[in-house]
Amino acid sequence: MNSISRSVIEVDNLTKYYGELRAVDHISFKVEEGKIFGFLGPNGAGKTTTVRMLTGVIKPDEGTARIMGYDILKEPIKAKEVMGIVPEASNAYVDLSAWSNLMLMGELYGIPKKERERKAEELLQKFGLQERKNEKVKNFSRGMKQRLLICMALINSPQILFLDEPTTALDVQSARIIRDMLLDLNRGGATIFLTTHNMEEANLLCDEVAIINQGKIAAIDSPERLRTKIGRLNAVEVSFTSSPNMEKLAEIPSVREVKKIGNKVRLYTSSPGQVITHLADYTKENNVQIITLQTLAPTLEDIFIMLIEARK
């Protein structure tokens, strides 16, 4: 029997002005329970402003947002009780220990002492911070601080976790640790709302993505369906036994663009099969052979750039 999905975040016509600037422009979307929802966009696109409205930090000028059915304006306390927040800027007290930060956060949520101590021990162990729990946070690496922030956001066992650019400026290993932890949390049932401008991260983590630019949503869908929809970004990548004639390759019917990528040539097209047929003719006419040949679906980054450029 199929389980019935329900929306745990519902956004309708959400809008925010800063003076004359419309930072978020009448956006609407839903996030289903148990999903990782990616909110993608370049810097200044409106990602952080949206998260701050959804989490009750700032008030929208128009529209509504419901978290687990609670209106963030009319029932902010109930909405905040079901969410955990990892903000873009650290909210940990660097002169306190990791343990003290967790105790303080648990106390703010009204969690009884024994329960918050039990939860803190569990989180510190899970996130690899147990041995450093009594050390001041100012001595932590950036990756350790980010793990602590996630622990702090989870102290109240939230149903929804909001993360604003959680891996920005982290080294590769730390970013991978954070991503693995998020996937583990999601497998445990948590719904995750993730803002990022990292296309690879969104591709690895997200069930669904919304692409925002200049305050407006350009597209919402799963990464796979977005790639399928933007068929004109398909490509054929080929390498030859000798240097190719780029001008002749660009003249192949249905080829939109030709790029040299190292020792390979990438031909962008909406008709890969037709291009491959013409490549066979090209090899005969120019007395060369094909060494490698593959078709490529558009990447999430290709789609992102195309949609952003279309908005300019």
Image (cartoon, rainbow, N blue to C red):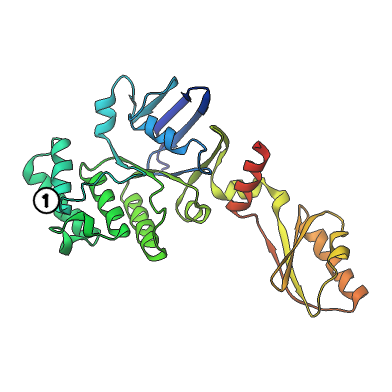
Residue 182 pos. (x, y %): 35, 53
Residue 14 pos. (x, y %): 47, 25
Residue 225 pos. (x, y %): 59, 47
Please give the name of the residue rendered at 40% of the width and 40% of the height, measured from the top-left corner: 3
Q: Is residue 110 left or right of residue 291?
A: left
Please give the name of the residue rendered at 82% of the width and 59% of the height, measured from the top-left corner: 274
Placement of 56 over or under 139, stated as above or below: above
Q: Secondary structure at mark 1?
A: helix
* Label tally: 1
Mark 1 sits on what residue? 118
Q: Quadrant of the C terminus?
A: top right
Q: Nearer the viewer, residue 225 or 100?
A: 100
Q: Quadrant of the N terminus?
A: top left
Q: Residues within 10 Å of mark 1 (few under 14, many from 20)?
A: few
Q: Is residue 218 left or right of residue 134?
A: right
Disc 1 residue type?
Arg
Please give the name of the residue rendered at 39% of the width and 57% of the height, measured from the top-left corner: 179
Residue 287 pos. (x, y %): 89, 79
Residue lying furthest right in this view? 285
Q: Nearer the viewer, residue 48 or 154?
A: 48
Placement of 283 over or under 215, stated as above or below: below
Q: Nearer the viewer, residue 51 or 70?
A: 51
